[in-house]
Image (tube, rainbow, N blue to C red):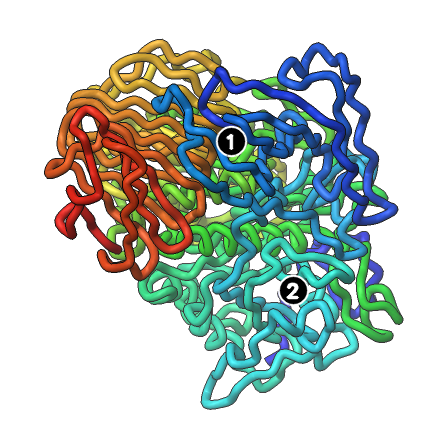
Amino acid sequence: MAMDGVTFSTSDFLDTDEDIEIGTSSVLEDSDDTVETTEAAPVEKTSDDSAPVAALPADDEDTDELADTLTLSAPAIMGAVVARTVISGGEVPVVRAEIGTSLRMLVQGLLPAEESSTPDKAVADADSWADYALALIPSDDLFPNQWHLQNTGQSGGDAGVDLNVTSVWDDYTGAGVTVGIWDDGVQYTHHDLDDNYDTNLHIVVGGVTHDPLPQSFQSAHGTAVAGVIAAENNGEGTVGVAYDATIAGVDMFFDNSLDFEASFYELDNFDVTNHSWGWVTPFADSIYDTNSTGGVDWQEFFGGFFESVETGRGGLGTINLVANGNDRTIGRDGNDSNFNSIPQTIAVGATSHDGYVSYYSTPGANLLISSPSNGAEGAGIWTTDRTGFWGYDRGGDYTSTFGGTSSATPAAAGVVALMLEANPELGWRDVQDILALSARHTGSAMGSGPEADELYTWEFNGATNWNGGGMHFSNDYGFGLIDALAAVRLAETWVDQKTSSNWEDPVVASGNFNLVIPDNNATGISFTFDTTDDFDIEHVGLTLGFSGGYTGDYNITLISPDGTESVLAITGNQGSAATTNWFFMSNAFRGETSAGTWTVEISDETAGDTGTLTYGELQFFGETADADDLYVYTNEFSDFAGVGNHLLTLNDTNGGIDTLNAAAVTAASIITLGGTATIDGQLISSVTGIENVFGGDGDDTLTGDDAANILAGGRGNDLLSGGRGDDILRDGEGQDILKGQAGNDIYELCIDDSKDNIRSYVDGADRIRFVEGDLEFSDLIFTDIQLGKVRIDYADDFVIVVNSNLGLTSADFDISDFLFA
């Protein structure tokens, strides 16, 4: 049915008919390798509009690895430098990117390498080298305008304020991930959408298959949303964030035969769903409403979302992203809509091209992350448009004026699609964890106070697992600006699996009250909840009941035992007579533990009426705390090291199997368990009690201790050295050296054409596991290079296995030495 009371979350930059209510909107490990350079032919620009690359002087003292001549390539890769590196007798063209961008090697036509006299340090045992495919920037003619994908300052904003997604496309494009778009229909015949659209995914409700081709002259919004997610990388027009994802639409606005509430029970048919719309009236959509207020069966409506995280993706849960709205200027808060504030949805805010919150983006403690969208003149989002007269750009097939949280949300949905391609086993709660942990600070400085259109001050919460301390949070941004590369790197290495089956949501305290809230009084009232529950927090819910007065008049703050203050509501004159019960939710406490005293403060600073608090209920969402701890480090470690509770030591003292995950760090990490570490260029003076380590995109050096360790270098040319324990050493993209040392070790290899080396291999004690590919022992080809050195070919890859002290030969290997996926 056509719906009243719902609004698109598109900003008012859009030219639209007045009949639509627009919502208020990682060369090598050997340090002795010599480096020479020769002049490299420039790479031809992909577009006349590409931003020029600043020339780097040949005698630039900041580039001491490069010799006399250096030629910059024009940006098929923005800011790339092409040099030639001599490594063990062969030349390697190396692509170097500007500081802060991802480093990529392109190995082409390398001459046969000479065997190194220092085998422990050389990777050049191979007699051939892999070609590292260097992903080009899309050639689609409008891509240079899509600042949200790659911000070079082309729209007048700040370079780098974007999704940080282009490096992700080297590996992931959203292929195999389905995204459902609940909107006003999708013109799936559009030439930049049709190859990514699957009509077989059209929902069936009441035995009827619902086709979302636009039925109204007003229906252009969903087509624009679809382009932000999955416009094709086809050499024309725009590009979507997940340009190989599979999409399908639902026309929830103008399909009069569609049972609105029933359509949400089809959410679980998709991996990801996007909702760039919201409810017009504050406090209209309550999870507690059993009376179909406003003509909506709210129990059915919310029931679809609750079911989707339980049954979607085979029980892993559908990821539902919702626009937090465009009503900042009129005082709304994301917590005045339960659609935005239930844990089963991810609320997304918007930032403009300068990194500051967009002037319209609705704030709230319910926000998880923010995403780039419009917010300044000339900063509109380029995307697909409904063709013909009824598009935003009438007579065209693309628009440059899309925006609002309507655009921010599908951009985030595209990032989630990339995450799920990287790791299809992520639970819906894992996705939320990763997005929060990988989001980066943006806007005003930490603790400096609001700037521009901000309303809130950035603060750190009381967690201890993010970059040595607490996570940054603001009601303007959630945990910050979404970072696709960091999120995907964490997704690749994620070993937890948080789903509905291991989710806990206890109500830990509740009570009836009869507390009058003084009218027009900033002091108001306060009360406390005490709990001894030891709970790892993801969300905190607070249900409050009122009589008399207006719920929209209240300032409501929740304070945790760690002292984190979260504003759940602000006086906004958004009215609604007092609600019997209303559910407020905060993400600000994520990573904290629950035990202690929680304080609620309520005040009414609007004159004219007096209300009474009648009920209060405190609810935690997450899981019971255990001793298996995860410590995440990102490219922000050096920014906040030593600030607040961010420690320069990592000493886990509560037992368990603990993990240090630095997968989101692009610089080389040096981590010695039981010793020190350098992460993001910052020294950590002590690392104890940690069992497992994941490296990032740099050329990492990871060293284990006496315990059983898992060491995974990730990308880059890594050196992994186990200790005395029974270790697992995991290769990644790049030419890695794996040294198990003592213990019964397992070397895990993938098929990545990277030609790794295994050192200190002990026959009968160590084993090799192939973690991907349908391989059998008969598929392996063994070649003796010399006594103590054996080459094993598998698929299109090979590994050199070395242990000269024991005289290893190919005859020493049998099926018992291998494990297969």
In the picture, the quarter occupied by the N terminus is bottom right
Give me the residue at 50% from left, 66% from top: 178
Residue 402 percent coordinates (x, y): 76, 56
Q: Is residue 416 above or below residue 800?
A: below
Instruction: Say what secondary structure mark 1 lies in.
Output: strand
Tell me the crowding category of disc 2: few under 14, some 14 to 19, or many 20 or more residues within 10 angstroms, Cα based.
many
Query: Could you tell whether 167 is left or right of 401 in the image?
Result: left
Which residue in the structure is indicated by mark 1?
Answer: 473
Marks 1/2: CA distance? 29 Å
For badge 1, the amino acid type reads Phe
Look at discs 1 and 2 and give the one toward the viewer.
2
Residue 290 can be seen in this image: no
- To which residue does mark 2 refer? 226
Give the quarter of the image for residue 314: bottom left
- Residue 602's x, y, as percent? 47, 34
Quarter of the view holding residue 45: top right
Q: Does residue 706 lie above or below 157 as drawn?
A: above
Mark found first going from the N terminus, 1 or 2: 2
Q: How many marks?
A: 2
Residue 72 at x, y percent in the picture = 76, 30
